[in-house]
Image (cartoon, helix red, strand yellow):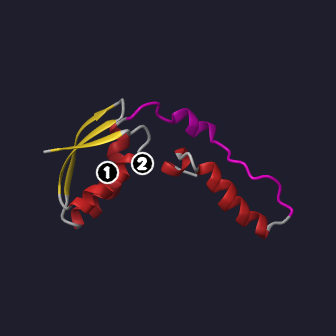
Amino acid sequence: LERACGSCASSTVTMQMGIERVLKENFPDLGEVIQVEDPVSEAKKPTELTLGAVEAELSRIKPAIVAMGGVVEIVAVDPLGVVELSYRGSNKLQQGLELAIMDVPFVKHVKFVS
């Protein structure tokens, strides 16, 4: 499991209830399915919120935001978990933007400023 799914608290349940179940249906003699961490990617995992992580997520979703008439820019990123964004657009789009940014590891709060 990668990205937000890899750090999600429900990832173990997803593995066991979803992926493992399907595998066992197709391979009855299959033993236990366990999640294996890549030691290289584990070593590269950030330990705090970074501007780069927020920029990466925003660059992924920004084309859709712009296509729906929204405008968004990063104002500030606090390593303790607060992301400040300048945003103009619909409320529904803002809610989706907030949820997407909250999926970035270590984000605790998204603050919209004018």
Say left or right for 68 vs 32.
Answer: left
x, y percentage for residue 61?
33, 57
Relative to the observer, which residue lies in front, 46 or 107? 107
x, y percentage for residue 34?
72, 48
Bounds of the magenta span?
Answer: 29-49
Residue placed at 72% from the left, 59% from the top? 20
Say left or right for 6 vs 16.
Answer: left
Indicate whether residue 20 is drawn in magenta: no
For the view shown, which residue lies furthest in the right direction?
A: 29
Residue placed at 26% from the left, 62% from the top? 92
According to the picture, the residue beneath numbered tag 2 turns out to be: 103
Residue placed at 39% from the left, 35% from the top? 49
SS class, disc 2: loop
Say left or right for 110 vs 23.
Answer: left
The amino acid sitting under disc 1 is Glu
Residue placed at 64% from the left, 52% from the top? 13
Between the C-alphas of marks 2 and 1, the distance is 9 Å
Position of 34 relative to 47 (above/below):
below
Q: Quadrant of the C terminus?
A: top left
x, y percentage for residue 53?
38, 42
Q: Residues within 10 Å of mark 1 (few under 14, many from 20)?
A: some
For the view shown, which residue lies furthest in the bottom direction?
A: 26
**Residue 98: mark in rendering:** 1
**Residue 76: mark in rendering:** none
Picture quadrant where residue 91 is located: bottom left
Q: Residues within 10 Å of mark 2 (few under 14, many from 20)?
A: some
SS class, disc 1: helix
